């Protein structure tokens, strides 16, 4: 009897396996029968819908038994007023008004150079001499003639004062003397061009033309003299900052090459706006006691163009924008322990500095603002506050 029972069960199992194999997707596909394939598809679709419905029931039950499962985790910070200094960042180069290349003013041989590179010189000091081509001898002869003309004029004047002689003789003597004196002064002026003198106190930066070379006026540079005491930085400022970047404003200057930062001020701003790039120029003082700062050195400038003593600053990455172009953040409301309600708040922002931005409207001192998780919550949603 037991044997018959086992045989019956085995037969049923074999038949079932045979039916499953016969009804498998692979077998149905191999049948190439449209009705059979369509029937199998309908069966699988029905099973899928049943499974989806059961999963939804399970999720609802889990949410009922564990309500905190879908509560988003967030971090928050408290808004507080602080001093906010906004800086306009620009780039400029070091310049000096006392950086001059001295050129030859007459043609001739560079006869003598009296200074060396790196030598400090005073204003008016003789730096070099150019062969004058005999002008000094001409001047000596002209001076003799001028002295004779002077003596003749003085004697003729004394006679004329005594009413002796004719007026024409007196006027001729006077004219000859004045003409000779004018010629002497002109020759002295011409001869002075054969000497090169320092226009200001400074340092000989470069001897450009060597002694013995032929020089020409306006074409041959002889040497460069630089004064590193009166240095300044020139920069171009966008016209939109014309009311903020003014004389006397504080400036933080950094020289990347030197690894040096100094605090200084704006000493002058231009009165002309360049129509090509809509900028005006500004000059910034450069203290240079150590003489390390050189002309054309690149400098980075930070100009304090705006200050708010009671600013509310927030990270820029927590701000979102709605379809109307309005910016908003989430503020915590109804805080109870670690639970709170996320409240969407429209804000208006001001100036930025780095990763933070100034909030002008929508936030008040002491508000608890969502930081991490700000982009994953919804208005009115319950959230859980976590701390690190």
Image: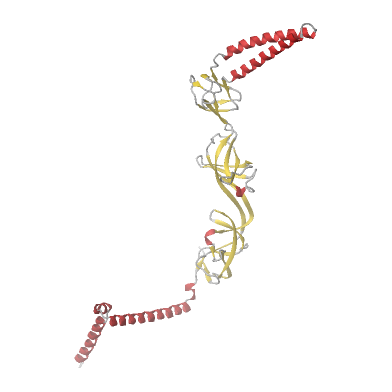
Residue 321, percent across and down?
A: 54, 64
Quarter of the view holding residue 127: top right
Vertical side of 44 occupied by 5: above or below: below
Vertical side of 180 occupied by 307: above or below: below
- Color scheme of the displayed model: secondary structure
Vertical side of 60 occupied by 325: above or below: above
Task: Farthest residue to the top: give it.
Answer: 164
Residue 60 or 195: which is nearer the viewer? 195
Task: Farthest residue to the right: give it.
Answer: 163
Seen at 38% across and 80% down, the residue is 49
Seen at 49% across and 69% down, the residue is 72
Residue 306 or 129: which is nearer the viewer? 129
Residue 265, percent across and down?
A: 62, 42
Residue 182, percent across and down?
A: 66, 16
Residue 332 or 48: which is nearer the viewer? 48
Figure quadrant of the N terminus: bottom left
Question: What is the number of callouts on the image?
Answer: 0
Vertical side of 335 occupied by 46: above or below: below
Residue 90, percent across and down?
A: 55, 46
Seen at 55% across and 13% down, the residue is 134
Left/right of residue 132 with respect to residue 151 in the rendered view: left
Quarter of the view holding residue 11: bottom left
């Amino acid at each position: 009897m037991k044997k018959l029972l086992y045989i019956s069960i085995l037969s049923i199992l074999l038949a079932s396996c045979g039916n499953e194999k016969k009804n498998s997707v692979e077998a149905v596909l191999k049948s190439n029968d449209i009705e059979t394939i369509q029937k199998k598809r309908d069966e699988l679709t029905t099973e899928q819908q049943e499974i989806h419905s059961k999963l939804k029931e399970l999720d609802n039950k889990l949410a009922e038994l564990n309500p905190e499962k879908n509560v988003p985790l967030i971090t928050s910070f408290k808004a507080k007023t602080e001093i906010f200094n906004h800086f306009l960042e620009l780039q400029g180069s070091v310049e000096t008004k006392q950086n001059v290349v001295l050129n030859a003013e007459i043609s001739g041989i560079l006869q003598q150079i009296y200074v060396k590179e790196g030598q400090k010189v005073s204003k008016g000091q003789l730096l070099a001499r150019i062969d004058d081509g005999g002008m000094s001898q001409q001047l000596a002869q002209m001076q003799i003639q001028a002295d004779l003309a002077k003596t003749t004029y003085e004697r003729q004047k004394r006679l004329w004062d005594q009413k002796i002689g004719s007026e024409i003789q007196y006027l001729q003597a006077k004219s000859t003397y004045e003409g000779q004196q004018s010629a002497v002064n002109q020759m002295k002026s011409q001869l002075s061009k054969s000497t090169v003198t320092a226009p200001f106190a400074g340092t000989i930066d470069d001897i450009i033309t060597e002694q013995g070379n032929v020089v020409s006026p306006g074409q041959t540079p002889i040497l460069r003299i630089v004064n590193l005491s009166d240095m300044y930085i020139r920069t171009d400022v966008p016209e939109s900052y014309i009311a903020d970047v003014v004389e006397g404003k504080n400036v933080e200057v950094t020289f990347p090459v030197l690894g040096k930062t100094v605090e200084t001020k704006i000493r002058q701003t231009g009165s002309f706006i360049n129509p090509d790039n809509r900028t005006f120029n500004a000059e910034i003082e450069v203290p240079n006691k150590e003489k390390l700062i050189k002309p054309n050195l690149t400098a980075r400038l930070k100009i304090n163009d705006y200050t708010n003593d009671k600013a509310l600053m927030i990270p820029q990455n927590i701000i979102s924008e709605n379809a109307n172009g309005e910016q908003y953040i989430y503020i915590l409301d109804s805080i109870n322990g670690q639970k709170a309600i996320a409240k969407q708040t429209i804000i208006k922002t001001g100036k930025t500095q780095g990763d933070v931005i100034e909030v002008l409207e929508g936030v008040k001192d002491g508000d608890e603002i969502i930081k991490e998780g700000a982009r994953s919550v919804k208005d009115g949603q319950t959230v859980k506050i976590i701390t690190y």
